[in-house]
Image (cartoon, helix red, strand yellow):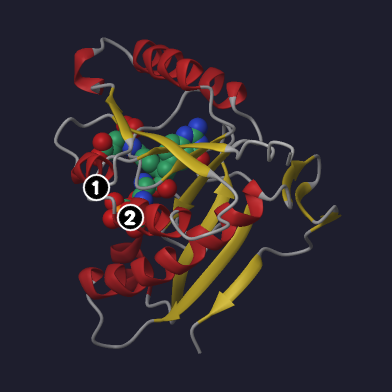
């Protein structure tokens, strides 16, 4: 008899919005030999389309509605309790729009990834596409990083860039950045599930070596 294969790492995705990144991750995780399983999708917004995408894919969903809590700490405690029930190996933020408290982040240190629509450390926070245009930048892009207490400040694992055109709008930039996101996030999640990426003292380790710079995909 064949020995049981070792169980796949369990992934929980948190999303607040339309969930196109979630969809890219679902599609990738359905490919043969993907080294992880999305066991649940959670949202702080009951109306998030991401929840419908999960349901369509027969993935368990949960909602912790932040408007029902008196404080950030109470919301995070409820989210943390739900996550402890699911017991994931990795939490993937995919368009998740609530800042997480330090206690929450510490509970999943080294096991929580975020995708952020800028070339970090540039443009942490919200409205990145608008701010890139206002600054007149010629390149823009996306970063995937470990989540730490510092908002969008955790060590960056990988980035992809796009060229900014003279006639770009926040919407046209968002569209091209999203395409890069959909390519990059499945690659990075695969690496993480394979055990190739680790949060270390001095930054990100890839195959046991500290990365001098984030991994980079380029569209040109
Ligand atoms: N939490 C911690 N501790 N560290 C990070 O790096 C985090 C995080 C939570 C979310 C995603 C981040 C992004 O990629 C993220 C990274 C939300 C806001 C925000 O201001 C900022 C950055 C990110 C996500 N949220 C408002 C808030 O009061 C609410 C905005 C809304 O609901 O639309 O939480 O950009
Ligand atoms: C993505 O561009 C993601 O990088 C960004 O929101 C979009 C979500 O799209 N995330 C943030 O701004 C986090 N604050 P999606 O719901 O279609 O995946």
x, y (%) of residue 151? Answer: 50, 39
Q: Nearer the viewer, residue 143 or 18?
A: 18
Quickly name the residue at label 1. Answer: 53
Give the side of residue 190 with respect to residue 28, left or right.
right
Q: Is residue 155 visible?
A: no
Asked if the residues shown at circle 1 and circle 2 are in contact, with their CB atoms under 8 angstroms apart, the answer is: yes
x, y (%) of residue 91? Answer: 51, 36
Quickly name the residue at label 2. Answer: 23
Instruction: Give me the residue at 73% from left, 45% from top.
Output: 198
Q: Is mark 2 within 8 Å of ligand 2?
A: yes
Which type of secondary structure does the marked residue at label 1 adopt?
A: helix
* Mark 1 or mark 2, earlier in chain: 2
Q: Is residue 201 visible?
A: yes
Instruction: Give me the residue at 26% from left, 9% from top.
Output: 70
x, y (%) of residue 46? Answer: 17, 30
Q: Quadrant of residue 7?
A: top right
Q: Quadrant of residue 33?
A: bottom right
Q: Residue furthest right?
A: 209
Which type of secondary structure does the marked residue at label 2 adopt?
A: helix
Instruction: Give me the residue at 54% from left, 58% from top.
Output: 120
Q: Is residue 97 above or below residue 217?
A: above
């Amino acid at each position: 008899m064949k020995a049981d294969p070792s169980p796949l790492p369990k992934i929980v995705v948190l999303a607040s919005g339309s969930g196109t990144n979630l969809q890219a991750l679902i599609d990738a995780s359905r490919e043969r030999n993907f080294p992880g399983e999305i066991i649940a999708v959670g949202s702080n917004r009951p109306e998030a389309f991401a929840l419908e995408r999960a349901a369509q894919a027969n993935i368990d969903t949960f909602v912790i509605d932040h408007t029902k809590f008196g404080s950030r700490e109470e919301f995070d405690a409820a989210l943390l309790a739900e996550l402890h029930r699911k017991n994931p190996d990795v939490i993937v933020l995919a368009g998740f729009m609530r800042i997480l408290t330090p206690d929450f982040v510490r509970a999943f240190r080294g096991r929580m990834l975020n995708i952020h629509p800028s070339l970090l450390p540039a443009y942490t926070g919200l409205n990145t596409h608008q701010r890139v245009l206002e600054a007149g930048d010629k390149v823009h892009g996306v970063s995937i990083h470990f989540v730490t207490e510092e908002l969008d400040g955790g060590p960056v694992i990988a980035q992809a860039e796009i060229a900014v055109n003279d006639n770009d709008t926040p919407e046209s930039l968002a569209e091209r950045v999203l395409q890069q996101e959909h390519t990059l996030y499945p690659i990075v999640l695969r690496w993480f599930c394979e055990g190739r990426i680790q949060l270390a003292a001095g930054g990100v380790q890839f195959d046991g070596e500290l990365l001098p710079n984030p991994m980079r995909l380029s569209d040109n």
